[in-house]
Image: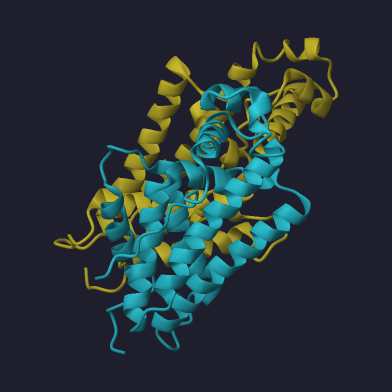
Chain colours: A yellow, B cyan
């Protein structure tokens, strides 16, 4: 199976800006967006608070930028996987990369999933749009493998469950713990195959 | 099916203390534990900050008390369900009540699941102990319905997935949205039955 690797969401940033992002990510994940001050971010990145403004105009913009890049990174691998053929290969690959992404990038994922309500206005709308596209890609992949007439669980409920399994990885995953990111991806694959009953009926 | 209803975790508290808990819950869920000040909690409950100390000695103790009662509430219904007979009835009931609990008490659940790392020392250990008991009850219920020799997913991975489905309800559930808490419970039941392949092989 060809493994789709998510590109580094911050590959275009200069090294100093990356330090700012990393410091902000750790603080948002640890103490939360609202309790993070520019001083925390400056201290974590080794810059002065004034120097932060070279890269980001506000704490809100920093969260938005992290959320946008994080969501786009997940969307990109999900859409690439969903475009594969045949449908069961697309589904399994999608679940694998989504699960592995949430393990490898668990700090990013925690911030983008659990600090989401700190975004407002146009920024919240834009992130909502990316999330919607991710959900739609998952729903298409699930629909393509679900058995016709298999209506004891509706497509929306089934897709939401596949997404839940992936997202919850960010909550429980620990680096150096029981599973590697690759093992998480493979576990998710087997679990999701059961959810959509892939392989348990002829197609 | 007899429906197991979780008791109100704060039933023994006097009305004023309940106001404090409700205010703290909303603030912890909305802006996070670290960004919540005693002033926020006081304002939300209509009390003075001095009056808060009649009920709780610190913000940490308030989070601990909320976490303890929240986790004990979930553990209680899970253990009651797990004790039912026969095993498939126990499993289905457990999944139903766990899912419904995370919908009905989504604010409590968000705080106890996502603000967990704000707890330290003995308090963190005690909450860890309750979580472990909940996991063990789920694992017993899953083990009792899983097919012998059904080893392409280990018991721990399967139980973790059942728990993930339930916990993630707290993240996506919206009151007045697509599903009622009862419908969430029933959806979870069907999804988890697929995960453990309940009903798809003779036993």
> Residue B145 falls in which quadrant of the image?
bottom left
Left or right: B39 with respect to A48? left
Instruction: Out of A194 and A72, give the one closest to the viewer.
Output: A194
x 37%, y 43%: residue: B173
> Residue A202 falls in which quadrant of the image?
bottom left
Could you tell me residue A1's position as x and y percent? 49, 61
Question: Is residue A162 in view?
Answer: yes
Q: Is residue A104 above or below residue A192?
A: above
x 26%, y 53%: residue: B183
Instruction: Out of B69 and B138, give the one closest to the viewer.
Output: B69
Left or right: B168 with respect to B57? left
Q: Look at the image and tell me in which quarter the N terminus of chain B lies.
A: bottom left
> Residue B17 falls in which quadrant of the image?
top right
Q: Is residue A109 above or below residue B200?
A: above
Could you tell me residue A93's position as x and y percent? 44, 56
The count of marks equals: 0
């Amino acid at each position: 199976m060809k493994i789709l690797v998510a590109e580094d969401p911050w590959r275009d940033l200069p090294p100093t800006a990356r330090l700012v992002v990393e410091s902000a990510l750790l603080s948002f994940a640890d103490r939360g967006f609202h309790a993070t001050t520019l001083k925390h971010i400056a201290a974590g990145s080794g810059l002065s608070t004034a120097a932060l403004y070279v890269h980001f105009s506000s704490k809100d913009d920093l969260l938005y930028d992290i959320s946008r890049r994080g969501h786009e990174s997940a969307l990109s691998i999900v859409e690439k996987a969903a475009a594969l053929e045949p449908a069961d290969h697309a589904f399994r690959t999608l679940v694998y990369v989504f699960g592995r992404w949430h393990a490898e990038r668990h700090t990013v994922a925690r911030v983008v999933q659990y600090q989401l309500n700190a975004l407002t206005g146009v920024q919240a709308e834009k992130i909502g749009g990316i999330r919607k596209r991710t959900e739609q890609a998952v729903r298409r992949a699930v629909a393509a493998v679900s058995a016709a007439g298999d209506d004891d669980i509706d497509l929306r409920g089934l897709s939401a469950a596949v997404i839940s399994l992936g997202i919850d990885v960010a909550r429980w995953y620990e680096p150096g713990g029981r599973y590697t990111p690759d093992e998480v991806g493979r576990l998710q694959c087997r679990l999701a195959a059961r959810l959509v009953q892939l392989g348990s009926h002829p197609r």
